Amino acid sequence: MYFLSSNASPFSLAREIAAIAAVECPSILHTHFTAFDAPAWMASMMLGKDKPKIVWHVHSNFPIEDSIKRRIKDLIKLRIMGRSVEAITVSAELMQSLCKRGFTNTIHVIPNGVDVLRATSTSQGRSEFRRKLGISESEKVLLCFGWDPITKGVDLVVEALMELNYGGGATLLVVGRDRLKGFMYDRFGSSLPVWLKIVEPRECIADLYNAADIFISSSRWEGFPYSVGEAMASGLPIISSDIPAMEWARATEGTIYFESGDTKGLGQAIMHVIDWPSEKWQAASKSNSSFIRENYDANRWSANIFKVYEKLLCGMQKEN
C-alpha cells in the first residue's frame, strides 16, 4: 500500500505516481478523485512506452462556473489530456456535462454500487442504539448526512422542521463533524433544539440506518449518493430533493420528491411520510430494499468496472 503526499502540487504527485508505477508496472491507472486526474496523466507520460492506460472516475456534479479560467482548464484537461484517457461517470448527467465541457474520448456510465452487507449488518439492536442516543422507541427518527451542510441541504431540513414547529414525537439525526457542528451552532447558538441530534460518522453505518425511520436526501447537487442507496437497502423510505442525480430512484414505491430548495415542500413530504399507514410503510420498505439488491448491488458494479478494464486491456494487446 502506498500513500501520496497531502497538499502536494500536481507535478509532485505525478512524480510520486510515476515512481510507484515504475515499481508495480500497472496496465491501468484508475483515479477515484479529481485531484489525481491530471497527475496520473502526467505520470503516464513520464513512463514513456510502458505507460499505462488512464481511467478517470467522475463522481461529483458540483456547480461549475463558466469563466475564462475554467475554459482554459477544461481545454487542457478534457480536450488535450482527455485524448488518451477513458472516463467512467456515475450518471448520464455527468457524462453529458463532460461532453459539453469538451471531453471527446470514450465515457462509460456506471452507477455506483451499494455494499448491501455493510449497509445492513448492525453491531447492536435498534432499541439499544436508540437508548445510547437518548431517543425513545416511539419517536420517528429522520436521518440525514451533513459533512457539508449546504451541499447536502441540511439547512433546508432544519428550516422545514422549524416552519412545521414539529418538535413532538420526531428527532432529526444528522451525521457529520466540525463543519456541521459549526453550522448548527451558528444557527442555534450554544443550545440546540431538543429534536436535533448531531452524531459522528461511525464504522458500523448500519446502526444509523437501523435506528432511523426515514432518510432525507435534501442535497442541492449530487453525483450518485451512496447514502441513499444504503438507506434504501436498509428498507428506509426516502425523501429526496428532485435533482437529476436522483432520477434513478423513481422506479421505487418508497421515494418521495420535493422541489430542490423548497422548505415548505420538504416539510409537507416529511409529514406525508410520517402519516403513512403501516401497510404503505411495509410496501415502501420492501420496494426500496429489493430495488437496490436487484439493480445496484456492489457485485454488479464491480462486474461492470471489470468489463471496462477488459476492453482496455484487449485494446492494449492489439496495439502491441
Image (cartoon, rainbow, N blue to C red):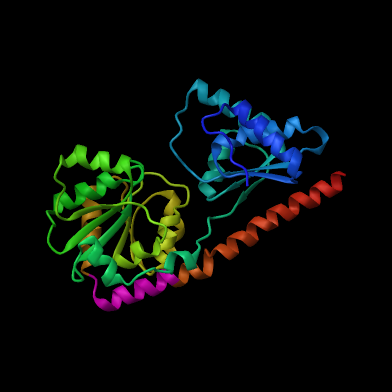
Q: Nearer the viewer, residue 116 or 73?
A: 116
Location of residue 33 in the rendering, given as x and y in whole percent from the top left corner: 55, 41
Name the residue located 20 percent from the left edge and 62 percent from the top edge.
Answer: 134
From what the image shows, is residue 303 above or below residue 289?
A: above
Decide whether residue 281 is among the magenta residues: yes
Quarter of image, res 74? top right
Q: Main secondary structure of the magenta part?
A: helix
Please indicate whether residue 76 sits to the left or right of residue 238 in the image.
Answer: right
Q: Is residue 13 left or right of residue 168?
A: right
Q: Above or below — where is 81 with respect to 108?
A: above
Q: Which residues are magenta?
A: 276-289
The image quarter containing residue 181 is top left
Q: Residue furthest top?
A: 68
Which residue sits at x=61%, y=31%?
Answer: 13
- Visible residue check, residue 108: yes
Question: x, y percentage for residue 193?
Answer: 14, 50
Q: How many marks?
A: 0
Q: x, y (%) of residue 108?
A: 63, 50
